[in-house]
Image: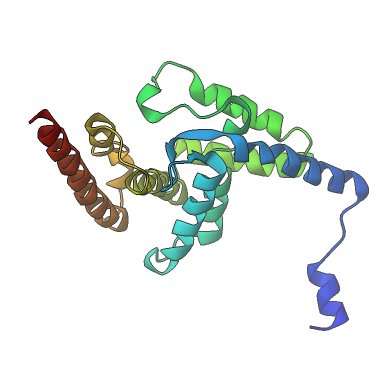
Amino acid sequence: MTKTDTASVALEADDMRLSGLLGFLQAAEQLKDTLRSGSTRNGRRESTAEHSWRLALMILVFEKELGEVDILRLLKLSLIHDLGEAISGDIPAPEQNPGDDRQERERHDFQVLCSSLPSDMAQDLLSLWDEYTQAQTLEARLAKAFDKLETMLQHQLMPPRSVIFHDFNLSYGRSHTDGFPLTRQIRARVDARTREIIAELESEQTSHAC
């Protein structure tokens, strides 16, 4: 790559813009300390940042199966979809209620998180957040489907919980995962393993009762 080529792909930002971009990145780091209800395979509480990273990785891994989907947009949606939780935290799916204004609070928190950004970048990220939430585009619907699948796959890696906990996964997010042949196919594998875990837990409960 020539010096001219390098200059064309590594432009400088003015000082004020640079400060805003770096300020946002430092604020977004709070997502690393936002804990979810699940855990890693070793039993450590999982952070929302870790979930978002593996969601993006999952999309990248399945890129060739996704056909004409805008992969870059899908990756962007996966990386920002839970950023609002950096401020107010994560609410586990079983504890969410339709009338709890959670979505409005998360949107407000996301706007607060973006407050240091230059206005054009803040608007770009807010538009992506709204796109994901409203799920009206192909990429947003896929992002939601993969989001549910990543969560359930993580639940299968962590130390087993209760039968009730794993049974919830059998209905969790189905309206999203049933929307595409690929996500339905993945879901079938996930559900099969979830049923195995439930059967193992029920067997343990029976043996302990005896």
| 58 lies left or right of 178 | right
Q: Is residue 151 visible?
A: yes
73 is higher (above) or lower (below) than 25: below
The quadrant of the picture occupied by the C terminus is top left
Q: Position of residue 184 (x, y in %)?
A: 26, 52
Q: Residue furthest bottom?
A: 2
- Relative side of 145 to 134, left or right: left
Q: In this rendering, would 177 be left or right of 9?
A: left
Q: Residue at x 49, y 45 (%)?
A: 51
| Residue 57 in the image, given as x and y percentages of width and height | 49, 58
Percent coordinates x, y for residue 11 in the rendering:
84, 63
Viewer-proximal residue among 172 and 137: 172
Residue 61 or 120: which is nearer the viewer? 61
Q: Residue at x 81, y 66 (%)?
A: 10
Q: Residue furthest right?
A: 15
Is 87 placed above or below 82 here? above
Q: Position of residue 166 (x, y in %)?
A: 26, 37
